Image (cartoon, rainbow, N blue to C red):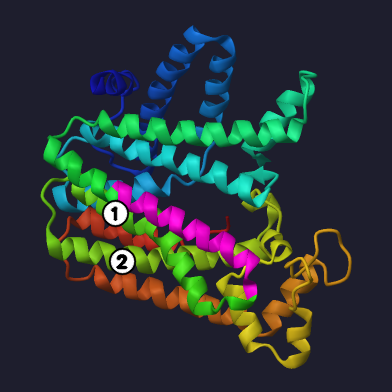
Amino acid sequence: MANDTLEGNRRRGIPRQASGHSRLLDAVEGTLADFLAAQIAGLDAVDPALGGLARTTRDLVLAGGKRLRPTFAYWGWRGATGPGEPLEPVLPALAALELMHTFALIHDDVMDESATRRGRPTAHQLFAGQHARAGRLGDSDRFGTTAAILVGDLCLVWADQLLARTPLPTSTLFAVRSRYDRMRVEAVAGQYLDVLGESTPDEWSAERAMLVVQLKTASYTVQRPLQFGLALAGPVATPLDDVYSRYGQLVGEAFQLRDDLLGVFGDPAVTGKPAGDDLRAGKPTTLLLLARELATPAQRSGLALDPAGAVNPADGSGGLNPAEMAELIASTGAVAQVEAMIRERVAAAVEMLTDVPIDEDARTALIELAVHATQRPA
């Protein structure tokens, strides 16, 4: 079964090892496209409606994105193996991370009731639209939510299936699976705390917000993908594993801190989602909690929650608009402090790579990724 997945990549002319970021992404995209084509054909044979479900899922998976998780996993693997190992055997594992990511995004959008993702309608909005256009019975929004949950579940199952197709020794796959399972548990734990924080914001602190960052983002985006990639290389070298863990936590935290800033100050035309959503929901981000800690009494009153928990009520009643809220948060000094936290974490992560025994191309790539992932506009 693994050879079926890899054959399509050979037809696409994908090299045996990625010599550049675009080639790596092409290899991952090709693996995903081949795998999803087979899944669509299988479900089409059962019922055309299931084929349609699978096609919508494919479109969501291949809708773009940063592909950070397979990228960090690749360099985690490459850091241990060097440039001589062929890429094809680990492609199913790298691509599986993107299916898992799609599962997480779809469920996150349902929980947050987000309308857009990457500038396009979210999964539940897509399915609600399909339901309404077809004139089906029942509530379109409820159908959209239900279908999106199922598609997220399907992506998680497919991620497991694709990972299992990785043609590596069983002992290696068990080690990889251990990292993969830990990453999933931590992502769920972080998501739960994130949701809990919205319902108990008065019990939250900047320190607890950083715990959410560590579990929901740092672990799932950088730390565990790196260690997942290292496990793909075979028996794990403990010193390198420790460096990956610490580097991954630092860069992952900086990544989420940048995301907090973009959620308030980002350009929706660039980020693909509305500014101020976290404020409307009253999400206790590190940025907002630091703003409250640093605020004067007069500033703090402007950052107070409404009875429903939001800083800026979605219905527009009272409070400040998103632009005014952004200006108020910046005036507290919280933005400057978060920017400093990002710089400190990136500098510490880069320093950790200085003397560790690692492939030089991987060292360079991880330094560049630390900067790129945390200084991005979207």
Say which label, 1 or 2, has the lower sequence index. Answer: 1
* Image position, residue 2 (x, y; %): 25, 23
Main secondary structure along the magenta-highlighted residues? helix
The local crowd at label 1, few if under 14, some if 14 to 19, many if 20 or more residues have their Cα within 10 Å, is: many
Q: Residue at x 62, y 70 (%)?
A: 200
Q: Residue at x 19, y 48 (%)?
A: 231
Mark 2 element type: helix
The answer to whether the residue labelled 1 contacts the one labelled 2, judged by CB atoms less than 8 Å apart, is yes
Amino acid beneath label 2: Tyr
* Magenta residues (range): 180-201
Q: Residue at x 51, y 57 (%)?
A: 191
* Image position, residue 278 (x, y; %): 66, 62
Left or right: residue 251 compared with residue 352:
right
How far, Cα to Cα, is label 1 from label 2? 9 Å
**Residue highlighted by disc 1:** 226
Q: Quadrant of the N terminus?
A: top left
Left or right: residue 304 compared with residue 122:
right
The local crowd at label 2, few if under 14, some if 14 to 19, many if 20 or more residues have their Cα within 10 Å, is: many
- In the image, 22 versus 247, the foreground residue is 247
Q: Residue 138: which disc?
A: none
Q: Residue 247: which disc?
A: 2
In the rendered image of this protein, does residue 14 appear above or below residue 302?
A: above
Q: Residue at x 28, y 46 (%)?
A: 74
